[in-house]
Amino acid sequence: MAYDLEEQEQLDELRAFWNKYGNFIMTVITVVMVAVAAWRGWGWWEMRQSGQAAQVYDQLRKAADGRDLAKVKEFAGVIFSDFKGTPYAQMAALVAARAYFDADDLKAAKAPLQWAIDNGPDEEFRNAARLRLAGILLDEKAYDAGLKVLDTAVTTGPFAGLYADRRGDLLVAMGKTEEARKAYNSALELLGSASPLYRIVKIKADSLGGTGS
């Protein structure tokens, strides 16, 4: 095919441009294509991981319901090692801890709760784990350790009042009546009178001579 002078000049410019920038353009295109493929692959991988984790979590829950602690340990271990990046890992920690607690194995119950505190990406789950761990430490009479677990500042949200209430329990057990009264009164303010726990906390505060709110 013959080209006129203007077309030939345009072709020469195009060839010069491609010779100068062609490798760079192809590199950019390749990187973008790889990124898109990786993103799609990651989405597929996440879905696959979540599906597998859900199956193991279901087995864990059934083992907990059946009080089969050997299976609880097995399935919880699988989730913590293979699926720790999924939401099921945090849920598994709470389920496993409850199973051990119900079996009066407080030492074993603390391990998955600590795992959730250290590794859980969701703050609500971490708060729940801290609250349960502090309760176990209260049962073990490890009061200072229980208060240390609750040192994390939670000043707003549904767990703030629960933290204050648990601090009150620990302080009462330590014989620190005045500090416990303040903790319970703080819990009353944070929970609000509409909370189903309000009356219980108020009874505890009143028993210490507190007026509540």
Image (spheres, helix red, strand yellow):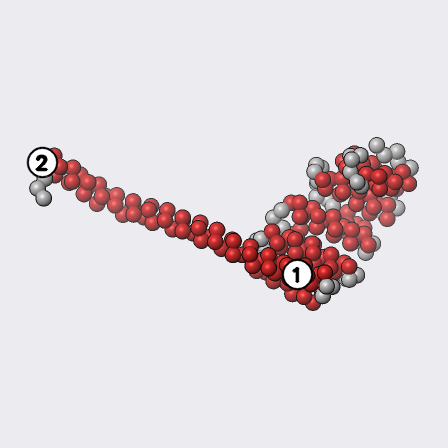
Q: Secondary structure at mark 2?
A: helix
Q: Residue at x 59, y 59 (%)?
A: 55
Q: Quadrant of the N terminus?
A: top left
Q: Secondary structure at mark 1?
A: helix
Image location of residue 138, percent across then percent down: 81, 52
Q: Is residue 115 left or right of residue 182?
A: left
The quadrant where residue 181 appears: top right
Image location of residue 105, percent across then percent down: 77, 62
Q: Residues within 10 Å of mark 2 (few under 14, many from 20)?
A: few
Image location of residue 49, percent across then percent down: 54, 56
Image location of residue 210, percent across then percent down: 88, 36
Q: Residue at x 82, y 47 (%)?
A: 170
Q: Which residue is mark 1?
A: 60
Disc number placed over residue 144 in the picture, else none: none
Give the amino acid at mark 2. Answer: Leu
Counting every numbered tag in the picture gives: 2
Q: Choose between 130 and 202: the one closer to the eye.
A: 202
Mark 2 to mark 1 CA distance (whole Å)? 77 Å
Q: Nearer the viewer, mark 2 or mark 1?
A: 1
Q: Residue at x 79, y 61 (%)?
A: 104
Give the amino acid at mark 1. Answer: Leu
Q: Choose between 96 and 58: the one closer to the eye.
A: 58
Q: Residue at x 38, y 51 (%)?
A: 34
Q: Residue furthest bottom?
A: 70
Q: Residues within 10 Å of mark 1 (few under 14, many from 20)?
A: many
Q: Is residue 110 above or below residue 162?
A: below
Q: Choose between 56 and 174: the one closer to the eye.
A: 56
Could you tell me if residue 186 is visible in this image? Answer: no
Q: Which residue is mark 2?
A: 5
Q: Residue furthest top?
A: 213
N-terminal label among 2 and 1: 2
